[in-house]
Image: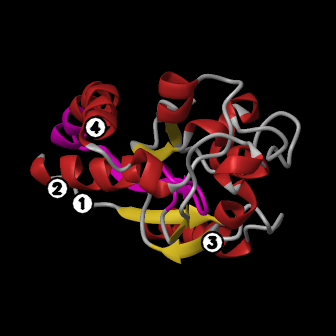
Amino acid sequence: MKRTRRIVIISHCLLNVNAKVEPLAKEMGGASIICKLIELGYGIIQLPCIEMAMLGSKRWGVVYEQCNFPAFREQCQKLLHPIVLQLKDYKEHGYSIEMVIGVDGSPTCGINFVSKGNWFGEFNSENNYKAKINTLHTAKGKGVMMEMLENMLKENGISTLFYGIDERETMHEELIQILNQKQENN
């Protein structure tokens, strides 16, 4: 196959739904958008899943506030560092870093919105967990790892589009249009 020299970076769970908090996986093997990326000839770099790395597969869902602390950000940076170096090398050798595709709603990989709330502590009657659940909401903004990735890319002179997939929708027509348009422009 001929190289297109076009690369997209995707959130880990778009290729490996097993990394998602149960029962959030909407598709069995991976997001249908992956097939479209391959069909259009994009090279795909899969980001690590910081939530799996830090909390494992049996974790509860977390919110932005639980991930927004120095040690978590440091771990994001450590996991992202080799990927940013790889992207820098690609850019220096004429490859196009087309976009980063994240998962909206994720406290770590959201692009347009993230989950937020006063979510912490034990699940027991003394802790009034029902009141905490009622604070859960989505808010505009990027997830912690996407904030780190954006800053690290800028520091390395890499400018790219960040696009968030809203998994509540199964058709990603807007993203497919953007990808088709990029292909036509090359």
Residue 5 x %, y %? 39, 42
> Is 97 within the magenta?
yes
Q: Which amino acid does label 4 sit on?
A: Leu
* Residue 39 seen anywhere in this rendered image of the structure: no
Q: Which of 167 and 42 is in front in this view?
A: 167
Q: Which of marks 2 and 4 is nearer the N terminus?
A: 4
| C-alpha gap between disc 2 and disc 4 | 12 Å
Q: What residue type is labelled 3?
A: His
Left or right, 51 with reference to 20: left
Q: Tell me the SS state at disc 4.
A: helix
- Label 2, on which residue? 154
- Label 4, on which residue? 87
Residue at 24%, 41% (x, y): give it. 70
- Label 1, on which residue? 159
- Label 3, on which residue? 137
Q: Residue 179 carries which label?
A: none
Residue at 80%, 69% (x, y): give it. 169
Q: Earlier in the sequence, mark 2 or mark 3?
A: 3
Residue at 48%, 30% (x, y): give it. 48
Q: Which of marks 3 and 1 is in front?
A: 3
Q: Nearer the viewer, mark 2 or mark 3?
A: 3
Q: Are marks 2 and 1 in contact (CB under 8 Å)?
A: yes
Q: Nearer the viewer, mark 2 or mark 4?
A: 2
Residue 49 x %, y %? 52, 32
Residue at 59%, 63% (x, y): give it. 104
Q: Which of marks 4 and 1 is nearer the N terminus?
A: 4
Q: Give the range drawn in magenta.
A: 87-110
| C-alpha gap between disc 2 and disc 1 | 6 Å
Q: Do the residues labelled 3 and 1 touch (CB within 8 Å)?
A: no
| C-alpha gap between disc 3 and disc 4 | 34 Å
